[in-house]
Image (tube, rainbow, N blue to C red):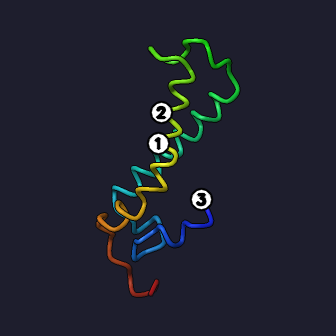
Amino acid sequence: MFFFLPWLDRAKVRSIRYRGWMYKTMLMLFAVNFVMLGYLGTVNPGHVNLIWFKNVTWAQIGLVIYFAFFFLMPIYTKLDRNKPEPDRVR
């Protein structure tokens, strides 16, 4: 997946400093999801530990979110409004 990131990212700017709110939100969701999946990989899958669902269900939801970050990247990077680049960056 990481090999295809340069082609999936349709934003005109590369720095996160000039990215819009949509990309920053998706990146934060991806980071939280990454930590959650790491935790769920270490615990017993059959127990009901997190809120109402079993750990397996949370892991499946996390897996969908993980791949949605990559598959939806061309859409939300194209639609996102970026801050204008300063002249020194161009």
**Spatial separation of the CA atoms under disc 2 and disc 1:** 6 Å
Work out how far the residue at label 3 is from the one at label 1, CA to CA, in angstroms: 14 Å
Q: Amino acid at mark 2?
A: Ile
Q: Which mark is residue 65?
A: 1
Image quadrant in which you'd find residue 80 = bottom left
In the rendered image, the residue lying farthest to the right is 42
Q: CA distance from mark 3 to mark 2?
A: 19 Å
Dot placed on the residue nearer the N-terminal end, 3 or 2: 3
Which of 67/79 is in front?
67
Kind of residue at disc 1: Ile
Residue ID at (40%, 58%): 23
Crowding at dot 2, Cα within 10 Å, few <14 / some 14-19 / many 20+, comes out as: few
Disc 2 + disc 1, Cβ < 8 Å: yes
Q: Which residue is mark 3?
A: 1
Rendering coords of residue 44 (x, y %): 67, 17
Q: 87 above or below 57?
A: below
Give the answer, above or below, for where 64 lies relative to 14: above
